[in-house]
Amino acid sequence: MRKLIICIFMVLGGCLLSFAQHPSLLFTQEEVNEMREGKGTVPAFDKTLSEVLSAADAALNSPISVPIPADGGGGVVHEQHKSNYYAMFHCGVAYQLTGDKKYARYVADMLEAYARLYPTLGFHPVSLSPVPGRLFWQTLNESVWLVHTAVAYDCIYHTLSAKQRTTIEKNLFAPMADFIMDGMGDNHANNKTFNKMHNHATWATAAVGMIGFAMNREDYVNKALYGSDETGKRGGFIRQMDYLFSPDGYFTEGAYYQRYAIWPFVIFAQCIENKLPELEIVTTPSALCGGAPYIDTMTPDEYGQMLLLPGTAATVANGTATYEAILYYKPADILYNVHPSDKSLLSVANEYQHTYLPTIGGFRVARDIARGEAAPIVYRSSVFRDGRKGDEGGIAVIRSTDPKLNSALTLKATSHGLSHGHYDKLTMAYYDNGNEILTDYGASRFLNIEAKNKGHYTRENESFAKQTIAHNTLVVDETSNFGGDIKVSSRYHSDIIYSDFNGDHFQVMVAKETNAYSGVEMKRTLVYVTTPFLQFPLILDVLQANSDKEHQYDYPLWYNGHFVSLNFPYTKASNGLQTLGTKNGYQHLWLEAWGQNEKTNTSSFTFVKDNRLYTISAATTPRTELKMLRLGANDPDFNLRNETVFLIREKEQKNHTFATSIETHGDYDVVMETSNNLTSSCEEVKVVMDTAEYTVIKAIYKGGHSVTLCLANAEDSKKNKHHLSVGGKNYDWNGRCGVFAK
């Protein structure tokens, strides 16, 4: 027993000693020394240090302002408190890197001002959230504030007197941490948020844990790691890593929220590694936010920005929010410090970050880039499983085997994705030439634009953005998946049932959904085909619906570009616009033009984006209704973006297969006024066979060329052999999909 007590004392003593070391969150003292010694040896990192000092000096040259909370996201007061935590962060880091106490004094003065303000605050006056904050309109922002401020406090800890630390911790940090964990008064919604599996909880646990480390409060650290009851069974950071990530590193809330939560995940993981290395936190599969999948689920645009793949509530069309993690949070620096053998992370940092974190990871990244150690980024076609066990569907990504083409294709078949999920089963998106071509709307929100609903989500987020019609997938009877009921949707997931990315001239992915619409089975096959007779790779899209009852099937294709032409006669609305429907997102769609193709069995639509054209050619009949639609109806506050969609409608069908050729073609130079290949090569798309066992699609192109797609509808294996004789021709292949080009 005595030996046991001694061992426990030694362990606890070691933990307390570790807690007492400062700095140790963003970096350790040994790492600070290494960065100081390296000054002048790595010009790129010197530039980063210069930028940090410039930001810190700018803060010193401005008066400290800690105003009483008054407005929502993007308001003047909101932004002041936000800029304050950045200022403290930069000044704290500047003190460690220079030793100049003027930076520490600034942080101390700011913290003492907040220590006077915070005890006087009730709930924030702007009431838009069920989890209201005190400094900010929602507690989430409070957590973000504390994550950054904890780093600053850790950096200047030893410059403060015991009295100063007591005042700041008693009046500011402890009340804020308690509030984040439990709320106050009769509102304890924060406790539920703190313990849930959600990006808000990631920020909350990181905030409480990091300030716990900085304050030497082991109780706060334990609650952050293992939930407010400290059991690990209800919540906590450790449980989040287990439940929020799949074995492939896919974040269940999708790529956007992986972007948003990557900073608290990686920075808190690093803090834990510094403070409690015995937990071996960075060696767990999901510890650093699935770093490789994070990189793999991006496609770079021509401006060096990063467009995250679609499928979450907050995806934005122009990508401005989606590459923030690369540009500001710079996770590659932290990831590289943990995985220095992954030299492709150096290329990520070099090509997309442009600057570096003022950490030992940032220093080593800049140093090793200068040494020429960077390896090329390999954008792989992959399937990322969803769910903590990898059994809740996933998202499939096809990338071109030629990196110069800069194209990617996605197929989403995941779980709902918690509260930010959309009703978008089997949706697809296409990226090419630095643009999102077939688009995902994302959310209707004006983040931090206070004049727009206080910077919050608009009502159109529910009425349109989450609805199935807002996505490139099948809509049955003008209703959304699961009737738009999140409780029902959260019980189910789609599945990626087949993929093959190793073909010589094609890549394929297949997904299935059986629960989104009662009695309707949906399957989707996307094939990315490289041919010698087409300028760019071809996409063949086969979207199948099977039911025992008749339905109306709508297939919307949201496109980013300008209308060029249709190959069928159409009527354009001239005397006022009508909406396509009355609910489930249809009420927001203006019907601009409509027609039916009675002369040919293939209907084509061409649009242009930048210097390239895109043609969608679909197998149709004279009964097929074709519609050109524009977003914006029933939108009195102009909240919705002006976006366009080409819709294919089939009525009174039990079973139907949408067969589509998506062709990228043409070059247009507006400066030189030159162009070529502006006319689509596709002459015909037809469904040659469509049975329970097999589906055969043939797309015919100019010059006598064709691509025939043979699908074994019940096949999941890549090994089984298939033989078909169709139209006097024999087709033999292995697995679910055979592609035959001539």
Image (cartoon, rainbow, N blue to C red):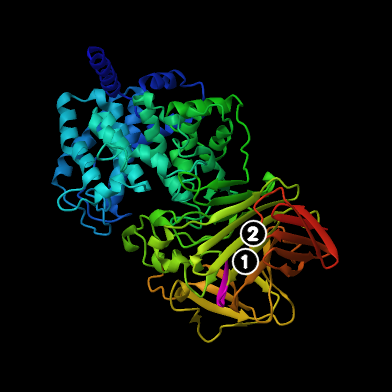
Binning the other alpha carbons within 10 Å of mark 1 as few (below 14), some (14 to 19) or many (20 upward) gives many
Residue 638's disc number? none
Q: Which residue is mark 1?
A: 544
- Residue 281, by quadrant, is top left
In percent of width and height, residue 334 lies at 46, 32
Q: Which mark is residue 525?
A: 2
Locate residue 97 relative to residue 47 in the image: left or right. Answer: left
Q: Amino acid at mark 1?
A: Gln
In this picture, is 647 found above or below 712? Answer: below
Location of residue 203 in the rendering, given as x and y in whole percent from the top left corner: 34, 43
In the image, 77: left or right of 340?
left
- In this view, 27 is above or below 444: above
Q: Is residue 413 magenta?
A: no
Query: Which residue occupies 64% across, 69% down?
Result: 658
Magenta residues, as a range?
Answer: 548-558
* Residue 265, quarter of picture: top left
Query: Disc 1 vs disc 2: Cβ atoms closer than 8 Å?
Result: yes
Q: Residue at x 31, y 60 (%)?
A: 454
Q: Residue at x 29, y 45 (%)?
A: 194
Assign the magenta stretch its main secondary structure.
Answer: strand
Residue 43 visible in image: no
